[in-house]
Amino acid sequence: MASKTAGGRLEERWRDILSAHARTMCEIDRVLHPHGLGASDFEVLDLLATAAPEEGEQCRVQNLVGRVHLSQSALSRLIARLEKDGLVTRSVCMEDRRGVWVALSSKGRDLHARVLPLQRAALARTLGA
């Protein structure tokens, strides 16, 4: 009986986490949509801004894979879309031709700075201050 109770609490906790995640992602999507971004788009821009804080600094796409909750192919498509929109630049890693570098463009850096307060406010609303 105790294991059922413990299992039930564990399932309830898991569902609470999923619910908080869904609410938060929806709220971020809602506030960023007028700026042409979704929550996953912003997450990549935010990680790039953090990993490569100076203009022109690059990050290997492989380093983003474990930090963004997308498959490698979905992340590649997202980065391609961000590149098409002029928000990031991509280049081949000369040391390892299989590797790809990605960097925020000045347009991407400006957009990130503009929407960062909106995303952080959405986090505060849904997750608590």
Image: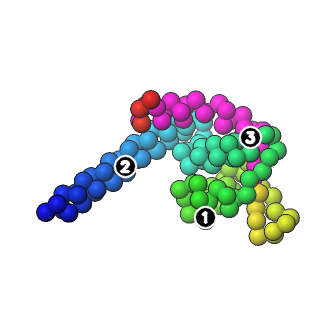
Q: Look at the image and say whether residue 106 sits in the magenta stretch.
A: yes
Check whether the beta carbons of the residues at disc 3 and disc 1 lie within 8 A of each other.
no
Label 3 or label 1, whichever lies nearer to me, is 3
Task: State the mark number for residue 44.
Answer: none
Task: State the mark number for residue 17.
Answer: 2
Q: Nearer the viewer, residue 2 or 36?
A: 2
Range of magenta residues: 102-126
Question: For the residue labelled by badge 3, is the local secondary structure a helix, a strand or a loop?
Answer: loop
Within-10-Å neighbours for mark 3: few <14, some 14–19, many 20+: some
Question: For the residue labelled by badge 2, is the local secondary structure a helix, a strand or a loop?
Answer: helix
Name the N-terminal-most of marks 2 and 1.
2
Corner quadrant of residue 46: top right
Within-10-Å neighbours for mark 2: few <14, some 14–19, many 20+: few
Position of the N terminus, as image quadrant, is bottom left
Residue 38, position as x, y percentages in the image: 55, 45
- 128 shown above or below 70: above
Residue type for callout 2: Ile
Q: Residue at x 42, y 36 (%)?
A: 127
> Mark 2 to mark 1: distance in Å?
24 Å
Residue 7, position as x, y percentages in the image: 24, 60
Q: Which residue is mark 3?
A: 53
Position of the C terminus, as image quadrant, is top left
